[in-house]
Image (cartoon, rainbow, N blue to C red):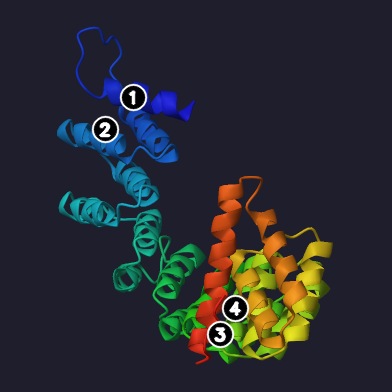
Amino acid sequence: AAAAAASAFSSSASPSRTSIVKPNAVMLNAAISACEKVGRWIAALAILKDMQRSGKADGISFNAAISACEKGQRWKVSLALLETMASSRLQPTRVTFNATISAMEKGQQWQAALALLAAAPRSGHERRDTISYSSTISACEKAGEWLHALGLLAEMEESGIAANVITFNAAISACEKGGAWPVALDLLDTLRKRKLTPDGITYNAAISACQKGDEWKATLQILLHDLQQDGLRPDVIGYSVGILACFQGGQYDLMFDLFDRMWKMNLEPDYQAYGVLLHACDVMELHDKEQMLLKSVGCIAGKDPHDREILQEAALVVASMARVIRGEALHPT
């Protein structure tokens, strides 16, 4: 329905001899919103341009067009529209800033996101809100700028703006990318103290942070205890990271225990998990188990023999690369 509306209004934006009713600003703004919902950012811009020519464009028009460009991964265009608003003497609102910051986040432009947040009002009806900060923190997370993410989290608290689970997830993930696993765990603890409920994204980010910090015990504590205590089930990502953490810590028996748990939960390991498990088999000379793993790797490839062969080779490459990184000689096959 949205696609049909977008197409209809996009056509009506151009003069037509057969047109009887000329669309007004409300109808055209609805058309831009329809374009935004179906990812037709070019059509949204065409309608906006026509509205500008006729003097019908307002803040709502620009907000909808910026949001359409944000969803279309066009951060430069979103930024240009914000600048056009200013030159058109239209006052950007919180919605405007949030949509543009989100576009910067999706475009991995963390510095631009910070600049936009700084430009957003600190007080009044259009003051920055949780969405403003969460999007900016997420932009910092994608760039591994965990210190900036923490600074924004502190600024939120000072400003009396409540952080939600999405905010904390972005901050924890930023710490994971920045190698700051103790801070990631502190944030997880703070989240709980604020009576917020961690979700799978929260725990996977914390698990990954511990794994990257070579903290296999902390990784398993979260994976096998904390996560399940909150009524959540570990997923493929969590288990795969847990297997990798045990591999890094030389805990090969625990690796296979996690592997068995995955199968009991009907979770299919990915090729990274198979790779490190194959390496463990090589180190411990568990040749029978190695053959079993090579056969079962086909389970994640479906029934296509070609896909199965590719995944088997990928798993072996991961195992071989792990041995190279550890400075071990490769055994001839």
User: Residue beneath label 3, please?
Assistant: 212
How far apart marks 1 and 2 lie (CA) works out to 8 Å
Q: Give the farthest residue toward the front.
A: 332
Q: Are marks 1 and 3 in contact (CB under 8 Å)?
A: no
Residue receiving disc 4: 208
Are the residues tagged 1 and 4 within 8 Å (C-beta)?
no
Task: Tell me whether circle 3 and circle 4 mark residues in contact (CB < 8 Å).
Answer: yes
- Tell me which amino acid carries mark 1: Phe
- Helix, strand or loop at label 4? It is helix
The answer to whether 167 is drawn above or below residue 302 in the figure is below
Q: Which residue is mark 1?
A: 9
Residue type, numbered disc 2: Ile
Q: Residues within 10 Å of mark 1 (few under 14, many from 20)?
A: many
Tell me the kind of residue under disc 3.
Lys
Which label lies toward us, 1 or 3? 3
Residue 114 x, y percent position in the rendering: 34, 73
Residue depicted at x 35% and y 52%: 73
**Judging from the image, what secondary structure is the residue with disc 3 in?**
helix
Is residue 4 among what the camera can see?
yes
Residue at left offset 32%, top offset 41%? 41
CA separation, marks 2 and 3? 48 Å
Question: Dot 3, how many residues are within 10 Å of its Cα: few (below 14), some (14-19), or many (20+)?
Answer: many
Residue type at numbered disc 4: Ser
Residue at the spot of label 2: 47
Give residue 2's position: percent from left, percent from top. 46, 29
Q: Is residue 327 left or right of residue 190?
A: left
Side (left or right) of 56 relative to 296: left
- Decide which of tag 1 and tag 3 comes sooner along the chain: 1
**Separation of residues labelled 1 and 3 (CA atoms):** 51 Å
Q: Mark 2 or 3 closer to N-term?
A: 2
